[in-house]
Image (cartoon, rainbow, N blue to C red):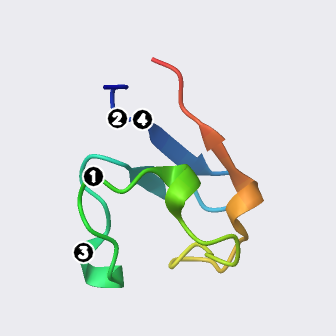
Amino acid sequence: MQPYRKYRCLNCGLIFDEELGMPEEGIAPGTRFEDLPDDWYCPDCGSEKQDFELIDY
């Protein structure tokens, strides 16, 4: 299984962590970024999914 990844919003810096999900937004822990709907947007600033970048550690 592929390790969980983190993605950062390029506009506000919000981190989407696949391992944690966003339960307060209805996104279960373990949800992969690519499995989010194409019309998903940043809950903090409203940026589109394509405005997120993979964080490489």
Residue 55 x/y as whole percent: 54, 31
Residue lying farthest top?
Answer: 57
Amino acid carrying label 2: it is: Tyr
The x and y percentages for residue 34 are 57, 52
Give the residue pinned by disc 3. 23
Mark toward the start of the polypeptide (3 vs 4):
4
Q: Which part of the image, by quadrant, shows the N terminus?
A: top left
Question: Considering only vertical position in the picture, is 48 above or below 39?
Answer: above
Circle 4 packing at 10 Å, graded few (<14), some (14-19), many (20+), is: some
Query: Residue tagged by mark 1?
Result: 30
Q: Residue furthest front?
A: 1
Name the element at disc 4: loop
Q: Earlier in the sequence, mark 1 or mark 3?
A: 3
Residue tagged 4: 5
Q: Quadrant of residue 51?
A: bottom right
Measured Cα–Cα span from mark 1 to mark 3: 11 Å
Q: Are marks 2 and 1 in contact (CB under 8 Å)?
A: yes
Q: Gap between marks 3 and 4, in whole Å?
A: 17 Å
- SS type, badge 2: loop
**Is 18 situated left or right of 14 in this image?**
left
Image-based side of 42 in relation to 50, left or right: left
Callout 1 touching callout 3 (CB < 8 Å): no
Whether pointer 4 and pointer 1 mark residues with C-beta atoms closer than 8 Å, the reply is: no
- Residue 22, position in %: x, y? 31, 69
Element class at badge 3: helix
